[in-house]
Amino acid sequence: MTKQQDAIYRVVGRGGVVLICEGRPSRTKPLVAREMTRMRTALRGVQITTVQVGADEGSVPLNKLSRSLLKLKPVLNRREIGDVYNRLISLRSDPVGIPKGIDPFKVRAQRGR
């Protein structure tokens, strides 16, 4: 997501991995390139397709997006879809760790004065 509300969505299905880009193509191109390099390292041999959504020339209108996704040729079977999805989940950028701050269950009650 950028300041201009450009976004990239990942879809995993029978047609492989699809990157759906929303926003101007000139602004989403670097986002797509960065996401493609991250995904190619984790997903060797999986077809990655990009679809630009919008009213620009060469883009798919939003109301025809589902139709264009259904037209993709099947490359993955059901078991492979689950494997690819789990590998993509492991690429998440937000760190899962210990929450910061005081643990409310370990705080000692103050003694009365």
Image (cartoon, rainbow, N blue to C red):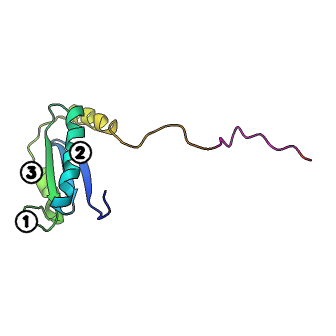
Label 2: few (<14), some (14–19) or many (≥20) C-alpha neighbours in 10 Å:
some
Q: CA distance from mark 1 to mark 3?
A: 20 Å
The kind of secondary structure element at disc 3 is loop
Res. 35 mark: 2
The kind of secondary structure element at disc 2 is helix
Identified by mark 3, the residue type is: Lys
Res. 71 mark: 3
Q: Seen from this angle, which residue lies furthest right?
A: 113
Q: Quadrant of residue 4?
A: bottom left
Instruction: For the N terminus, give its image quadrant.
Output: bottom left
Res. 57 mark: 1
Part of the protein shown in magenta: 102-111
Q: Residue at x 7, y 61 (%)?
A: 58
Task: Between residue 47 and residue 68, name the one nearer to us.
Answer: 47
- Closer to the eye: label 2 or 3: 2
Q: Seen from this angle, which residue lies furthest bottom?
A: 55
Q: Is residue 111 in view?
A: yes
Q: CA distance from mark 2 to mark 1?
A: 23 Å
Q: Are marks 1 and 3 in contact (CB under 8 Å)?
A: no
- Badge 2 or badge 3: first in the primary sequence: 2
Identified by mark 1, the residue type is: Glu
Q: CA distance from mark 2 to mark 3?
A: 23 Å
- Badge 1 or badge 3: first in the primary sequence: 1
